Image (cartoon, coloured by chain):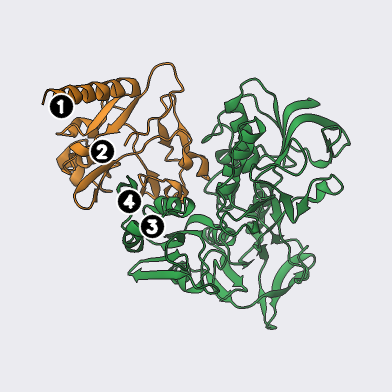
Amino acid sequence: MEDYYQYVIVGASAAGMAAAHTIRQCDHEVSIGIFTDEMDAPYFRPLIPFLVSGKKKAADMSMIGSGPYVEKNITINTGMRVIGLNISQKQIVLTDRSTVSWDKLLLATGSHPYMPKNIDGLFTSGVFALRTLSDARQMAKYVEQTKHAIMLGGGILNLKTAFALLEKGLNVTLVVYSPEVLSQLMEPEDAFLIRKALDKAGLKIITGVNAKAVLSEKGKVKGIMLDNGSELPCQMVCIGKGVRANVNFLADSGISVNKGIIADKYAACNLPDVFTAGDVAVTYDPVSGAPMMTALWTNAVEMGRCAGKNMVGIKTIYSGTFGILNATHVADEPFVSMGTVHTNSVDYEVYRYHKNNSYRKLVFSPDGKQLIGAVFVGNIQNAGLYRYVIREKMNINHLKQNLIDHSLHYGHLLK
Amino acid sequence: MKFPMKGVIMQQPKEIFVKIDRCVGCRSCTMACAVEHSESKTLFGAISETPIPKSRVYVEWVAPDKKVPLVCRNCDEAPCMSACISGAITKNDEGILITDMDKCIGCWTCVMVCPYGVIGRHLETHKAYRCDRCPDRDIPACVEACPTKALVYDTVESYSASMRKHASIEITRSDRE
């Protein structure tokens, strides 16, 4: 292994790979080394539920050579965990205490599943928190000895995983503490079409309750106990309660951390020549200026690209952060959620429309002059234009009716 | 409406240019596109196929009466390609964005980020589709079908030269008048 690269990138997922490819596109000569503690070469993380369902093989998920990830001469060091930084020497420190030097460093270490402290028995065989390909392989194996799986949390990851398990013929129950599924991405009344589709698909959903403990027998899951006192038998439990940034290795490094790594608008850290991007980075809400972290593939790629440009000296402001930016298809129901969609607390101007199999909600600023968020369920056509209008903070006076009617097209945006 | 991509190869690539003032909204382009992307590649064959072939070019209308043909611009830093969570979208040697149908999982992230709204959702096959510049043809079907030459298939260099020539003719004509 080399002990020096001009560009060292810690983390080989969305942000790290996007940055590496951006650097390579800008400069064909520089040396780029990526370090990941995972044993697998970079892969499209959002696809791992397909490994559980058997729809895709690990090889089909590889990032190298796929999509925009086609550049050459990027060294990927797998199975190498970075345990610390030596900023004054410009070095990263690996598990075996060996060091690798850099001129510019990107910290794109991502995040790990949050394991709720208030649920007992989470470290039992049969409890999964799907994050890596390795997790997915283990889960796929465990399916063989599972009849009933219980998913804790009603987010996208758990829904996708739930469907993978349903396809394997398991009974699946989703236990959601919020009043409705997908509560991070929409309000309960926005989710009713999706809920209907989930119910129809055979997913059992219990809302408003939390798990208290995982019950086990001979070290294996045999059920869960809910906080209302009832017990549900199951052989598998999946935790989908969000993620936390991987920042432990930065203790005493001098890098400014508050839950995640603090980034400025150029994706730079508080110390020179160190940058950050992706799930691990704390960025700022472009409107309110409040610090925010998003665990979204799309944001991670965009920020990784931005960091890559800044690392090679092309000053680029990262402006892409959307707290919410999700498109997915669950139970044959497509939906898109972006921008500000939780509207109960502030006096936003909100339009809701529901007909047959489609629903949309458009959220405008309280003065009605800006589109700030949108939810589409069923018909998601031209959602990209709405994202553009939100992101550019466009003056929407002449477009407002088109926005509300969902008739906006690019012709309207031409001068 | 001209958003030519920068050429990354030696030979100048051709683009589909749109002359909005020439479009009469006849939708010959959308018809030709759907036929070109059918199994039979004939109009009568195409209309009886299942799933029904889809056009990848769109003609929109803006009040009071402007028609706007829209087709994938093959953006330089294509948002769809970066956003795709399955690596299905690549740029080929000619600078054309291609969606790999085997890799597409129908998550619609590309639809969510395309600022032109030119990526369609094929509901039967559960795949995203877009203009592929008609790989089997010298001239894309939409361009060939346009009766008013509102769609032009040309290199950036040659197209801008023709625009300059057109402008100079207009200027000399107005001088004479």
Can residue B103 be seen in this snapshot?
A: no
- Residue at 18 percent across and 34 percent down: it is B146
Q: CA distance from mark 1 to mark 3?
A: 38 Å
The mark closer to the camera, 1 or 3, is 1
Q: Amino acid at mark 4?
A: His
- In the image, B11: left or right of A124? left
Can residue B94 be seen in this snapshot?
A: yes
Residue that label 2 marks:
B39
Q: Which chain is green?
A: A
Marks 4 and 3 in Cβ contact (< 8 Å): no
Query: Element type at marker 4?
Result: loop
> Quarter-wise, where is residue A83 in the image?
top right
- Residue at 64 percent across and 57 percent down: it is A292
Q: CA distance from mark 4 to mark 2?
A: 29 Å
Q: Position of residue A279 (x, y in %)?
A: 66, 50
Q: Amino acid at mark 1?
A: Ser
Marks 4 and 2 in Cβ contact (< 8 Å): no
Q: A367 above or below A411? A: below
Per the rendering, the colour in which chain B appears is orange
User: Please, which chain is the residue tagged with disc 1 on?
Assistant: B
Which one is in front, A300 or B47?
A: A300
Residue that label 1 marks:
B174
| Residue furthest out toward the left | B177
